[in-house]
Amino acid sequence: MMTKNPTVLKWLSEIRELVQPDKEMWITGEEAQLEELRKEAVATGEMIKLNEEKLPGCYLHRTKPNDVARVEDRTFICSRKKENAGPTNNWCDPQEMYKRLYDIARGTYRGRTMYIIPFSMGPIGSPLAKIGIEVTDSIYVVLNMAIMTRVGTKVMETLGDSNDWVRGFHAKCDVDPEKRYICQFPEDNTIISVNSAYGGNVLLGKKCFALRIASYQGWKEGWMAEHMLILGIENPKGEIKYVAAAFPSACGKTNLAMLIPPKYLRDKGYKVWTVGDDIAWMRIGPDGRLYAINPENGFFGVAPGTNEHSNFNALASTRKNTIFTNVALDLDTNTVWWEKLNENPPKHAIDWRGNPWDPSKYDKNDKLSAAAHPNSRFTAPAVNCPCLSSEFNSTSGVPISALIFGGRRAKLAPLVYQAKDWAGGVFVGASVSSETTAAAAGAVGVVRHDPMAMLPFCGYHMGDYFTHWLEMGEKLGDKAPKIFHVNWFRQDENGNFIWPGFGDNMRVLNWILDRCEGKADAVETAIGYLPHPEDIDLTDLDMDRETLASILTVDKDAWLAEMDGLSEYFDKFGDRLPPSFRERIASIRKDLQ
Ligand code: GTP
Ligand code: SPV
Ligand code: MN
């Protein structure tokens, strides 16, 4: 028994009664306990121990082929009133959903162990941190939570007798996709997830708590929970400026957060420091500026495409004490492999489904014939990251100079532009559209609206969320970060990316920071300020100014059409849409004409 907290004891006894476990285990955070669980998972086949010399402390896990990504159509915001979930969320009456979920979970821990994981999102004891308790019947979940969050006894000590904690209940059940539900009850600080054993559906500290529940808490309490990376950029004088950036799932947050600047900038002394790669909690600090912490303690990153050249720091982070999910197993070396890790696919491998894999049968048009699932992931401890910021465990967070929105857009959106002011930036964030990716079940490559990259993660009415953003700007006043939009994903007629991306995105970050300091020039357009092509440094790049100029233009007709689409999209928010959005569409249209 790890606590005397009456609210915790009451909730645990309710869950215990419901699921009928054989055994019960509090996760203390001690290494010896975690090691026992790893051994057990290996003994039952739940995890495969990898080559201890090449990948010390690393394991491979495969989920069921029907359980490989978030499931947005089965994710619900169960607020008491339907209108408070808003038009972008699935909704169900809380009492009805509790009953349905309890019926599904009833008795499903029989013969199994109930693991109780106390966890802190954010450094334990930080005024910006929040506590949760996840109950699960999955060792995989326990071991992932122990990497992704701060778990254990200390968390319960910090909680004391407080009732300010989030209840997270996960039951693996039969992993039946027809009975899979990921439900948030924002007014009850409660999350229930059944019939999945995959990442974002079951590591309840992540999207369910740190975004869906926390966005609601932030709205009520005057702060922000965002789908944002946080990075520090150190200039040759040793000054570090922090930026936070929101891109939809699998659109480049981990990569930007860990980028290595081009050689000419490294030689000058530029460095990048990672604070977070997926989630930012932001509050106004004592000096009136916006401060951010990363509530997580590890990286749940996309494996395919990660290699020494594209993201050296992410790959380095995965070389020890990491859990790989749904990547391929190289039988000759007992190591892992995924597409684009290198040019040498393993000769004898087991693919993400657990079947023998033959590289010659890989069909480029059938992504699922790949050795690793396109949404296969690594769970790596943040401490492994070579460029981890010294502020990573800061309890007060880092001051944010710029906020950046972005999406994956083959056409239209320029490489970078700056919003004219905070309210204009909120509009830019609300207008984010992006091609869907393998991070969620469903079609890939379809452009959809994804405001602030929060479409699947906002725990309340998105119209109210936009208004909350506007109000934060009013409080920040002239200390508000400047707001930008980027697009690394413009394609030419042959479908090739025009901008080199990855480390070269540093060239764009430098323009952004120069703008924040009033040091860079810009062209004023209908949508915002764009750099002159000569304002982006192309040193050592195999790219000419004309090509760069081609992704720094505002196509009048295409943008007018974009405004039509946006106007129609905004209709769904009804009278909760900030009125200024309509005025802005009108003025952008006028400026484009
Ligand atoms: P989540 O963890 O799902 O929230 O995703 P994320 O935003 O952290 O995405 P991540 O950085 O893992 O990138 C996803 C995919 O985008 C990978 O396949 C990357 O190789 C690719 N990618 C990232 N940055 C760039 C870039 O600058 N240019 C191009 N062309 N691709 C990129
Ligand atoms: C995302 O989909 O945005 C992720 C992965 O970061 S998951 O944790 O599955 O949500
Ligand atoms: Mn994410």
Image (cartoon, rainbow, N blue to C red):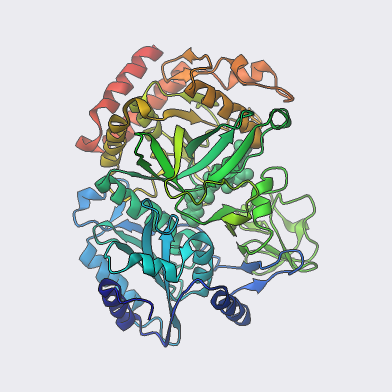
**Along the line of sight, the residue nearer the viewer: 303 or 360:** 303
Residue at image coords 72%, 64%: 55
Residue 39 in picture, x, y percent from top left: 61, 79
Q: Would you place residue 518 above or below residue 122 in this image?
A: above
Q: How many marks?
A: 0
Q: Would you place residue 225 above or below residue 528 in this image?
A: below
Where residue 543 sits, quadrant-wise, is top right
Residue at image coords 68%, 31%: 269
Residue 240 in picture, x, y percent from top left: 55, 34
Where residue 178 sits, quadrant-wise, is bottom left
Residue 492 in picture, x, y percent from top left: 63, 28
Q: Would you place residue 314 above or below residue 239 in this image?
A: below
Residue at image coords 28%, 38%: 468
Residue 154 left/right relative to 326: left
Can the viewer see residue 211?
Answer: yes
**Along the line of sight, the residue nearer the viewer: 227 or 461:** 227
Can the viewer see residue 564?
Answer: no
